Image (tube, rainbow, N blue to C red):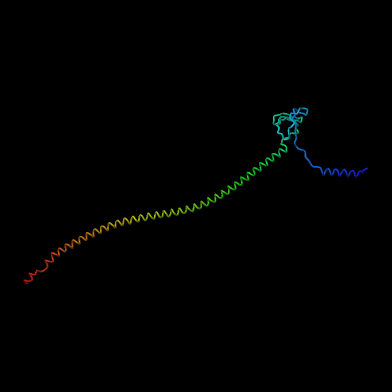
């Protein structure tokens, strides 16, 4: 006969070994709820496959523990109230959360892409501003040069005008001097003619007077 102590130890070891070798499992939360024609199990089943998470329209709630609903395909019937809840099941919430997470990730990627585009656009704007500043500086220098050239040009034009006026004055004075010179030339020629005429008259007079003043030879002999 096996002693009680050995039997107890053997059973204990068997239980421990069985517990160590057992695998943990979970019951699936998928549930199919029947849709009945009335408030109770005695009524016929209209739909035996209302899966957990099915979206139903609430029509009437009874104190009998049943609720009248309408299915997405238009069937109306009664289901046990304790199978109904106001919020989606965890699986649907998880799917919605995953979808929302994926949308958030997509928005994040799009935001990052937009941010990168904005950064590139900002860099282009900064580069354009630098180019515009450089161009503005160059244009300012060119404007200063143009102003200087314009000032020099105005000064040259003013000087040219002054020279033209002075040249006109000199031309006028030259014309006056030329007229005066012509008058003097005419006067000198007139004087020369008068002197020449006077010399001719003087010569003629001398030619007449000198012979008359010369003593006669005949008169000398009588003396």
Can you say which quadrant of the picture contains the C terminus? bottom left
Q: Is residue 39 positioned above or below 168 on the image?
A: above
Q: Position of residue 91 (x, y in %)?
A: 72, 38
Q: Position of residue 58 (x, y in %)?
A: 71, 31
Residue 211, by quadrant, is bottom left
Front position in the image: 150 or 70: 70
Q: Position of residue 202 (x, y in %)?
A: 16, 63
Q: Position of residue 195 (x, y in %)?
A: 20, 62
Can you say which quadrant of the picture contains the N terminus? top right
Front position in the image: 110 or 192: 110
Q: Is residue 180 positioned above or below 60 on the image?
A: below
Residue 82, by quadrant, is top right
Residue 189, by quadrant, is bottom left
Q: How many marks?
A: 0
Q: Is residue 212 left or right of residue 165?
A: left
Q: Is residue 204 left or right of residue 55?
A: left
Front position in the image: 20 or 43: 20
Q: Is residue 212 left or right of residue 85?
A: left
Front position in the image: 108 or 180: 108
Q: Is residue 144 positioned above or below 108 on the image?
A: below
Q: Is residue 180 left or right of residue 152?
A: left
Q: Residue furthest left?
A: 222
């Amino acid at each position: 006969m096996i002693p009680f102590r050995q039997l107890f130890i053997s059973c204990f070891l068997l239980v421990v070994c069985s517990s160590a070798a057992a695998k943990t499992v979970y019951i699936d939360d998928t549930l199919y709820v029947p849709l009945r024609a009335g408030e109770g199990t005695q009524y016929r089943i209209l739909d035996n496959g209302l899966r957990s998470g099915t979206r139903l329209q609430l029509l009437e709630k009874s104190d009998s523990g049943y609720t009248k609903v309408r299915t997405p395909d238009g069937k109306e019937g009664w289901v046990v109230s304790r199978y109904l809840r106001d919020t989606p099941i965890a699986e649907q919430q998880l799917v919605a959360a995953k979808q929302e997470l994926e949308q958030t990730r997509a928005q994040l990627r799009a935001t990052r892409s937009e941010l990168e585009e904005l950064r590139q656009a900002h860099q282009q704007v900064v580069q354009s501003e630098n180019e515009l500043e450089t161009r503005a500086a160059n244009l300012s220098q060119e404007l200063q040069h143009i102003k200087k050239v314009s000032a020099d040009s105005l000064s040259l034009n003013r000087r040219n005008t002054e020279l033209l006026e002075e040249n006109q004055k000199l031309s006028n004075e030259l014309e006056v001097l030329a007229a005066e010179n012509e008058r003097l030339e005419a006067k000198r020629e007139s004087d020369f003619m008068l002197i020449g005429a006077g010399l001719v008259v003087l010569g003629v007079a001398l030619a007449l007077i000198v012979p008359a003043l010369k003593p006669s030879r005949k008169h000398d002999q009588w003396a």
